[in-house]
Image (spheres, grey):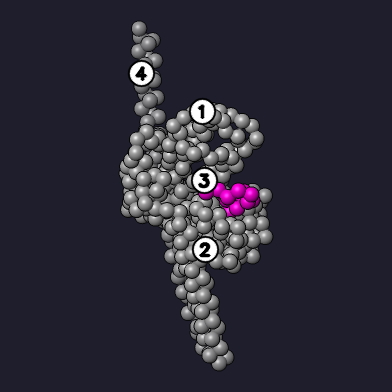
């Protein structure tokens, strides 16, 4: 981690999974939980960033168990198994094309949940998408990622609110992602009838809809403030989503666009192909590096010079990284000092006003 002092303040029981991963797969820790992602999300508060990074590895270990130290890929060699990939192919969640300003868009549609499948598959599929999104710096900016939920449809689908609450709480405490959350509700034409909840109990359709809307209306943390949209006439959802920077061809058909879930399956296939190409490229680089070492013919002088060059490059990179971190800390320190000075000045001003009011009262 960029700030060892900050990591030292995290209790051992909360950073055990992080330390284990750092010992076994340090390269994976560096590439899939880049500290800068967490530092940017936490507004350069290194202590909060360290705690959140440990939460990430704790949750990753909880979800993926013995596969937690494998790469976060869907090409058959990573942490996700075939059932997890099946969920992604079905469109839960679905990564839609980015907005015109380059923001990620992620869609959760309850109708795409697979029956008789381990619910943790949903969580692992969501984890994969979040891990991919977090690598984009825009994900750590205010309202970084558009988060869409097809909450209420004319044909009602039962949502496990307890399970969903756990998922949303993880979003608020684990991932370095800021969401621009939008829940879309197209109310059924009639409120007659009942809904059987996950618990097995029967409730009226109206009561169930009220429960869903109440559940989604609650703010969850500083960076997850929900907005609820209702469609009383055709085109309202389409206009709202286009107002977020989405193009009509990138908006799902259920919201008035032309994007279909067949494109989610195509995205998965393309992603598998991309990950395999990246894996083959890494293998090729390692092979060339090994061949280069063999071709040196054991010349100790050449090897020593090469090692010195590599060490010098690493040292320069380390010094530059440390300089950047120190610069960020200095900027944060200046910002806090300026705020502190302002607060002191304001305190003096208010104290003077208080004394003046006190003397005025005595005079009267």
- Screen quadrant of the N terminus: bottom right
Tell me the crowding category of disc 4: few under 14, some 14 to 19, or many 20 or more residues within 10 angstroms, Cα based. few
In reply to whether residue 123 is colored magenta, the answer given is: yes
| Mark seen at residue 300 | none
Which badge, 4 or 2, comes first in the chain's sequence? 2
- Residue behind mark 3: 111
Q: Position of residue 280 (x, y in %)?
A: 51, 75
Residue extent of the magenta highlight: 111-124
- In the picture as drawn, the residue positioned furthest to the top comes out as 364
Q: Which label number is shown at residue 31?
A: 2
N-term-proximal mark, 1 vs 3: 3
Q: Is residue 139 above or below residue 161?
A: below
Q: Is residue 25 above or below residue 256?
A: below
Dot 4 or dot 3: first in sequence order is 3
* Residue 163 drawn above or below residue 248: above
Disc 4 versus disc 2: nearer the observer:
2
- The residue that mark 4 highlights is 356
Labels 2 and 3 touching (C-beta < 8 A): no
The one nearer the camera, 141 or 118, is 118
Query: In front: mark 1 or mark 2?
Result: 1
């Amino acid at each position: 981690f960029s700030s060892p002092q900050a990591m030292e303040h995290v209790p051992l029981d909360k950073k055990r999974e992080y330390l284990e991963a750092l010992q076994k797969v340090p390269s994976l820790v560096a590439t899939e939980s880049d500290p800068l992602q967490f530092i940017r999300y936490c507004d350069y508060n290194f202590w909060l960033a360290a705690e959140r990074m440990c939460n990430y590895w704790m949750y990753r270990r909880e979800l993926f168990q013995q596969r937690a130290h494998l790469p976060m890929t869907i090409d058959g060699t990573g942490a996700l198994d075939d059932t997890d990939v099946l969920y992604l192919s079905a469109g839960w969640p679905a990564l839609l094309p980015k907005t015109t300003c380059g923001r990620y868009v992620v869609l959760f549609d309850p109708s795409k949940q697979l029956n008789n499948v381990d619910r943790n598959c949903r969580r692992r599929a969501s984890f994969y998408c979040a891990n991919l999104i977090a690598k984009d710096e825009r994900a750590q900016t205010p309202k970084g990622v558009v988060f869409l939920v097809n909450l209420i449809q004319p044909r009602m689908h039962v949502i496990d609110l307890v399970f969903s609450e756990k998922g949303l709480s993880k979003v608020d405490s684990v991932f370095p992602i800021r969401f621009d959350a939008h829940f879309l509700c197209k109310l059924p034409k009639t409120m007659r009838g009942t809904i059987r909840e996950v618990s097995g109990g029967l409730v009226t359709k109206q009561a169930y809809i009220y429960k869903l809307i109440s559940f989604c209306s609650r703010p969850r943390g500083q960076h997850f403030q929900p907005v609820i949209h209702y469609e009383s006439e055709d085109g309202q959802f389409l206009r709202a989503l286009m107002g977020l920077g989405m193009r009509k061809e990138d908006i799902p058909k259920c919201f008035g666009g032309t994007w279909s879930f067949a494109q989610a399956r195509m995205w998965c296939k393309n992603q598998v192909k991309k990950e395999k190409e990246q894996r083959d490229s890494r293998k090729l680089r390692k092979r060339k590096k090994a061949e280069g070492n063999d071709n040196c013919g054991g010349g100790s002088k050449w090897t020593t010079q090469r090692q010195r060059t590599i060490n010098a490059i690493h040292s320069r990179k380390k010094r530059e990284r440390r300089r950047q971190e120190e610069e960020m800390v200095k900027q944060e320190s200046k910002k806090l000092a300026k705020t502190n000075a302002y607060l002191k000045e304001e305190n003096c001003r208010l104290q003077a006003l208080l004394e003046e009011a006190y003397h005025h009262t005595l005079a009267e």
